[in-house]
Amino acid sequence: MTDITITAPAQRRIPHKTTAELSALIDAVRGAIRTAGAVPPERDLAAELGINRHQLRKALKVLRDTGEIEPRTGKAETPPWHELAHATNPIEVIELRSVIEPALARLAALRASPAQVDQIVAAVENADDGDYGGADLAFHKAVADGARNGLASEFYRLLRAVGTDSRIRLGLPASVCPKRRAERDAEHRAIANAIAARDPETAEREMRRHLANVQSQIMDRLTVR
């Protein structure tokens, strides 16, 4: 689960009107759940965030669909990636990411709103040292949203959910090498800077370079295993 810290109640009172605002609401719900240590009752969570339960359920559905929280108790819900995770492996996931994400970075450089550009840049600058995977996921999802293609964004979320499924995840060490963390952040920053500069060619190239490094790391882990 992505480590999101909400520091003031006012930040949680987010109306649901646009995709960007729904994304902000999802982040607020994610933060509230992490603070509570579990999913609070809908009535309490809605009151805490200052929203109605219809809005809350939209955010909760996204978190359930991406596997960040468990399906509702008592319902035989099957995550949409359940069968896909059985049929694939980490190499196939990163290969598909390497096809899709450079194009999303290019589109983000061309289409992202100023607010979405700010979110992409913030995802780099605010990377949490204690949550390497969560920070990585937040950045890449922000880029996908910045492409402003709803179908592509939802497909990307499905792809990442498959990639993080426990059945195909590679075991990661308890702590990430500081050198690799710095390299990852520099790669993210190069992508974000290109998007902010509205430079689609560089954004696409830097994303491709970054994912090539990720693929190399995956291959190394598979080799030692």
Image: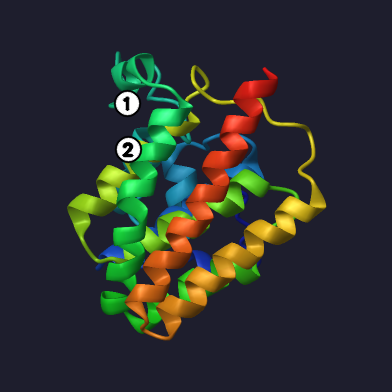
Distance in Å between CA atoms under marks 2 and 1: 7 Å
Verify CB contact (< 8 Å) between mark 2 and mark 1.
Answer: yes
Q: From the image, tell me which residue sits under label 2.
A: 158
Callout 1 secondary element: loop
Point out residue 165 in the picture as x, y percentages from the top left corner. Answer: 47, 25
Badge 2: few (under 14), some or many (20 or more) residues near its Cα, within 10 Å? some
- Identify the image's colour scheme: rainbow, by chain, secondary structure or one colour: rainbow
Q: Nearer the viewer, residue 41 or 194?
A: 194
Query: Which image quadrant is residue 216 in?
Result: top right
| Earlier sequence position, callout 2 versus callout 1 | 1
Tell me residue 62's x, y (percent): 34, 43
Query: Is residue 109 in view from this perspective?
Result: yes
Task: Identify the residue under disc 1.
Answer: 81
Considering only vertical position in the picture, is 220 above or below 152? above
The quadrant the C terminus occupies is top right
Circle on res. 165: none
Q: Residue at x 33, y 16 (%)?
A: 87
Q: Secondary structure at mark 2?
A: helix
Residue 34 left/right relative to 55: right
Residue 174 picture location, percent across and down: 78, 33
